Image (spheres, grey):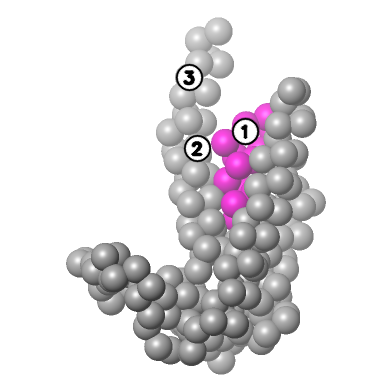
Amino acid sequence: MSVTVRSRFLLWGGAAFVVALDQLTKAWIVRHLPAYTPVDWIPQLASLFSFTFVKNTGVAFGLFPQLGGIFTVLSAIVILGIMLFHRAIAGTDLWIYGGLGLVTGGASGNLLDRLMRGYVVDFIDVNFWPLREWPVFNLADSAIVVGVAILLFDAFFLSEKKVVTDATV
């Protein structure tokens, strides 16, 4: 498989997978859970996490709930920017394509929520120390965080190694 095919698969396939999984889990949560009530389906895991359906009109962690419209526009701009500039951003670096795929999928999943529901569905509620007070989040949020972590790791560790390797050749 060529680099071009792999890079497209990582970006667009990864984004599509994240959106599909995110939207399926959110639809299930909305249909089966009462809002703002923690549920422990697996009692053995209750000390680690529970499911709590939260309607988030703000940005990450429920911050700035009155600015939901601005975050809708910002999400659309981020997605459009990645769509337009992914080749210039990533070049041939498959790690960057993978990270961009996760960010695009996560941003798209939360954008779909804002457009369809007027809020983002959050449902993963961690219960263990030191994250006991951590805000409720969803799979799209997780994909964004992991994608950004990959991009940062690549920028600070892998790209530096590539420059040194290229310079020594």
Label 2 with label 1: CB-CB less than 8 Å: no
Query: Start and end of the magenta stretch?
Result: 88-104
**Which circle's residue, 3 or 1, is located before the other in the chain?**
1
The residue singled out by tag 1 in the image is: 94
Given the image, on which type of amino acid does mark 1 rest?
A: Leu
Disc 2, SS: helix
The residue singled out by tag 2 in the image is: 154
Q: Which one is in front in this view, the residue at disc 2 or the one at disc 3?
A: 2
Q: Position of residue 103 (x, y in %)?
A: 60, 55
Disc 3, SS: helix
The residue singled out by tag 3 in the image is: 164
Disc 1, SS: helix
Given the image, on which type of amino acid does mark 3 rest?
A: Val
**In the orientation shown, which residue stands out farthest toward the right?**
84
Seen in the image, is 30 located left or right of residue 11?
left
Given the image, on which type of amino acid does mark 2 rest?
A: Asp
* Quadrant showing the C terminus: top right
Residue at x 60% of width, y 42% of height: 98
Q: Is residue 80 above or below residue 2?
A: below
Which residue is at the front of the view, 77 or 122?
122
Residue at x 38% of width, y 73% of height: 41
Q: Is residue 18 above or below residue 7?
A: below
